[in-house]
Amino acid sequence: MDSHIALAELLYQPYERRRHMTLPSLPCYPCPHAASCCAYGTTLSEEEAVAIEAKLGPGLVYKTHWGEWRTRVKNKRCVLYRDGGCTIHDQSYYPSTCRGFPWIDPETGGGYEYEVTICGAFEARPELIAIQRAIPRADRETQPR
């Protein structure tokens, strides 16, 4: 099926159907875009941070002053990035932020709300932006804090 027709059909689906849509796969591992999304490290749940340190040793994650767990960045890449991809991509403790990027925000369960064009696939395939914008955003007012 032509990708433009598929995109048009997707965008005109009712809200409830779009919530359960199948999203295009991206070439994340190994990444052909120099892992541009890995340049900033990532947010972690406390469970992910504990698992990473337990499996890989201390010093790879840290807790920010405001209490958020993050992976460290070294040489402009997440410390878990090596040889073209994430060293824990296939592990159960692979960060949910990375697993959902650029489609789903793991904190809200809705569409990812932040900058997605850091992913080189979005530059190579601009139609992905429309697909990403079609994902319903979570209502932050109803989300548990």
Image (spheres, rainbow, N blue to C red):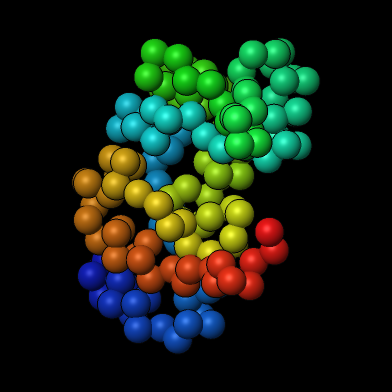
Looking at this rendering, what residue extends furthest in the front direction? 65
| x, y percent for residue 76 | 37, 19
Q: Residue at x 31, y 41 (%)?
A: 118
| x, y percent for residue 131 | 35, 65
Q: Quadrant of residue 88?
A: top right
Q: Nearer the viewer, residue 19 or 111?
A: 111
Q: Is residue 124 left or right of residue 138?
A: left
**Residue 52 appearing in the image:** yes
**Quadrant (top left, top right, bottom left, bottom right) of the N terminus:** bottom left
**Residue 31 appearing in the image:** no
Q: Residue at x 47, y 20 (%)?
A: 73
| Vertical arrangement, residue 69 with respect to residue 136, above or below | above
Q: Nearer the viewer, residue 145 or 19?
A: 145
**Quadrant (top left, top right, bottom left, bottom right) of the C terminus:** bottom right
| Vertical arrangement, residue 36 with respect to residue 16, above or below | above
| x, y percent for residue 23 | 45, 61
Q: Is residue 52 left or right of residue 4?
A: right
Q: Nearer the viewer, residue 10 or 137?
A: 137
| x, y percent for residue 46 | 73, 36
| Vertical arrangement, residue 96 with respect to residue 16, above or below | above
The number of discs equals 0
Q: Residue at x 56, y 67 (%)?
A: 140
Q: Residue at x 40, y 47 (%)?
A: 26
Q: Nearer the viewer, residue 90 or 74?
A: 74
